[in-house]
Amino acid sequence: MNKWQIKDLQGVGDVELSLDDSKRVFVLFGTNGVGKTKILGAIGFFLSLKLPNSIINTTRFKLNAKSFELVSCNTEYLDHKHHSEVEDFIIKETDEKIKRILYKPELLKTIKQDIDAICYIATYSRLDKDDSGKKSRNSYLEHVGSPQHDIKKWIISKAQSTNPYQKEHKVRKNEIECLLEVLNKFDDRIKDSLTIDFNNNVYLEIDGKERELSELSSGFRSIVRIFQAIISAYSYYQEDTDNLLAVKGIVLIDEIENHLHLEWQVKIIPTLKKLFPNTTFYIATHSPLVLSQLEEGEAYLLKRDEDGVVRSQVINSPNTRLLENVLPEAFDIDLNELKRQNMENIDQTKVQQKLLKLLNG
Ligand SMILES: Nc1ncnc2c1ncn2[C@@H]1O[C@H](COP(=O)(O)OP(=O)(O)O)[C@@H](O)[C@H]1O
Ligand SMILES: [Mg+2]
């Protein structure tokens, strides 16, 4: 089991997650306020400490004037050869306004799997046309995990750095090609080419029409942002790799369904899994359609137990059961029962009408 124990997470309290360590997709469900966003932030924060050139390691910046303290860590974390039942580590978010991060470096050495890159994609970063200057609770993580927020600026800078007359031939596919390739694989209406005009407007070809980036619908913008965030973070951390898609990274995505058309909600996770075969995903969502495509061990409901601790419960085989049979477990919604009630009501009305007819002769 991939176990997480988080102590005193701000606004949430204690958290215990038991995730199936044979999986590399973990999707968290749960009512508003249960702590999904904060938990993604804590996991991302901890894992980012493990990066070879983590910004946190070198600059020790503050986290909204709060500091994390890693209290303990079990040696087996992320080592898939071991199946430790003991808690893996504890992250404590302290209340004191200490403007540095407290952690014991020896704790990190005990994490066996090396992570080559990390990417955190917050909800707001996909909503706004221009998100520069916006801050969120996990903004430090966005900084760590996805250095370039502005898709347009990123594309232009990457395009400028690719010089066709350059003598040295770059083996590696450049980031833009990579982005276009994954977008096209995700939805083949998005053509795998783009153009930039003299005013630095960037055009994608969607459904046979040229569309400027800022004119994209929020759904298209959101999907471009998800893929761009991963690719820009991976290329930032792994400059020398010749295959960005194969990087061994961690991707955290909050409210993945935001703005996505239903058809895209259905295929987003299976596609991400296929396109990034060495990535581990931690995702939060409310979408039953995202849930419907998850394998056993990939979907978890977060619930606050009677002792006040927020714990994870696996949601059983979402992709092999009828959705209406999974909904009660995941969302406390029993469509079958509601349907039965509706039918009964209809039956009763029919009976009443018949009786009335009889009575009225
Ligand atoms: N900076 C903060 N200070 C105090 N409470 C917070 C802070 N951030 C979040 N919370 C609280 O933590 C709880 C979990 O929030 P969040 O992780 O956003 O929930 P979810 O994403 O599951 O809807 C909420 O009750 C929220 O009000
Ligand atoms: Mg949230």
Image: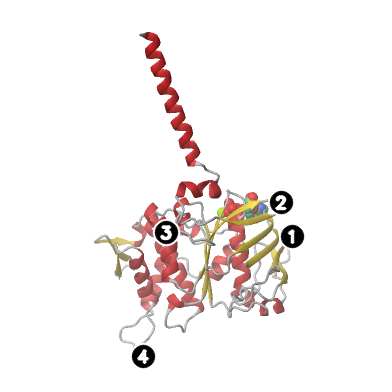
Q: Which quadrant is the C terminus positioned in?
A: top left
Q: What is the number of the mark on residue 95?
A: 1
User: Mark 3 or mark 1, which is nearer the start of the sequence?
Assistant: 1
Q: Nearer the viewer, residue 218 or 203?
A: 218
Q: Are marks 2 and 3 in contact (CB under 8 Å)?
A: no
Q: Are marks 2 and 4 in contact (CB under 8 Å)?
A: no
Q: Secondary structure at mark 3?
A: helix
Q: Is residue 80 left or right of residue 231?
A: right
Which residue is labeled 4 in the image? 168
Q: Position of residue 7 (x, y in %)?
A: 71, 61
Disc 3 residue type (three-letter): Ser
Residue 196 appears in view: no
Which residue is labeled 3 in the image? 222
| Numbered disc in front, either 4 or 3 | 3
Which residue is labeled 2 in the image? 308
- Asked whether mark 3 lies closer than 8 Å to ligand 2, one says no
User: Mark 3 or mark 2, which is nearer the start of the sequence?
Assistant: 3
Disc 2 residue type (three-letter): Gly
User: Mark 1 or mark 4, which is nearer the start of the sequence?
Assistant: 1
- Asked whether mark 1 lies closer than 8 Å to ligand 1, one says no
